[in-house]
Amino acid sequence: MNRSKSSLGGDLTQIGRGLLMGSADIIPGVSGGTVALILGIYQRLVTAISHFDLTLLGHFRRGQWARAAVHVDLRFLVALAAGILAGVGGLGRLMKYLLENQLELTLAVFFGLILASTVVVARSVQRWDLLKFSLAVAGGLFAFWLVGQPFLKGADGHLYLFACGTVAICAMILPGISGAFILLIMGKYKFVVDIIHDLGDGRVTVEHVLTLLVFGSGCAIGLLAFSKLLRWLLARYHGQTLAVLCGFMLGSLRRIWPFKQLPTSAEKPDITHSQLDNVLPEVFDAHLAAAIALATAAMVLVFALDWLARRHSQASR
């Protein structure tokens, strides 16, 4: 009885984590991989995805369904995926509203989350040396350059859409590099999001379904291939890989700097359609104080979660 309650509680926890990842994934500049790192499930997620391999096919061929489920950590993945889908579908409109009406305050929260997460990941790197520091700087410079790139119009056709899915999903599981932002650069973010909204509103067409199947196939292939590479890097070069991820997260802060050059027209600012320039606040007012308070609260939350995770890990030894 206690075990079933514990399992149910674990499932609900993973659904909640997926909800946070899904809501973050729809914001260009915020990576679901970053949220997974914040929540302490990143390595487990990468390992589970990378286990969709020949060993799994062998379990299927022999009818060993229970072993197959354990091999890919199926219960964890199903609960997490349910939360991610709920986050993308259920919180998508809320995040759209916040980004249009409370852009600076919303970005301030995510800025604090990612900044604190970078500190947490940096503390987990054992024995920083010149190589790791250089890798972190290189990763930071690359991410800083990437998030400053202009948006492309994008090509038509299913082959290009397949390529977009393959590249974007790789970025989505990399902390600091947003898959949504990669779609923006490649010119397909609005196209994909509009189709998802149409399906959510019940407007289903054959072309919509075919488009999502092509995009989803690209995502699946990219995810499986890239997760294996990430798992290998984390196993062989753990410290160096974390150093690069630290750089990615720091560099990505350029994209979600809360204070933007807002349009002078009555049109609402929208970071999903245009690249807004970063600016420094001109005056210290209540709005700036609120943004600083929210960023600070987000940082405190990350540090508290990390402290609880470390305490739980020590208690379980």
Image (cartoon, grey):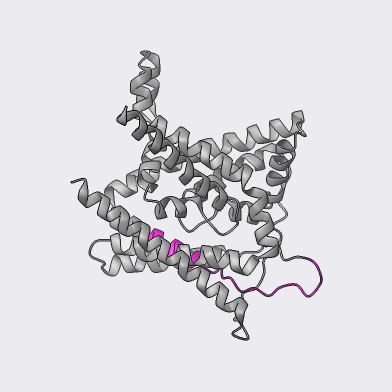
Residue 203 position, x and y percent, is: 77, 34
Is residue 314 a member of the stretch shown in magenta? no
Residue 147 position, x and y percent, is: 57, 63
Q: Residue at x 41, y 55 (%)?
A: 38
Q: From what the image shows, is residue 58 above or below residue 291? A: above
74 left or right of 145 in image: left
Q: Quadrant of the N terminus?
A: top left
The answer, for residue 35, to whether it is visible in the render is: yes
Residue 166 position, x and y percent, is: 55, 42
Quarter of the image for residue 75 reads top left
Is residue 256 a member of the stretch shown in magenta? yes
Q: Camera-side residue: 281 or 12?
A: 12
Q: Report the magenta residues as a range.
A: 243-267
Q: From what the image shows, is residue 107 above or below residue 217? A: below
Q: Camera-side residue: 287 or 118?
A: 287
Q: Please, what is the dominant secondary structure of the magenta stretch?
A: loop
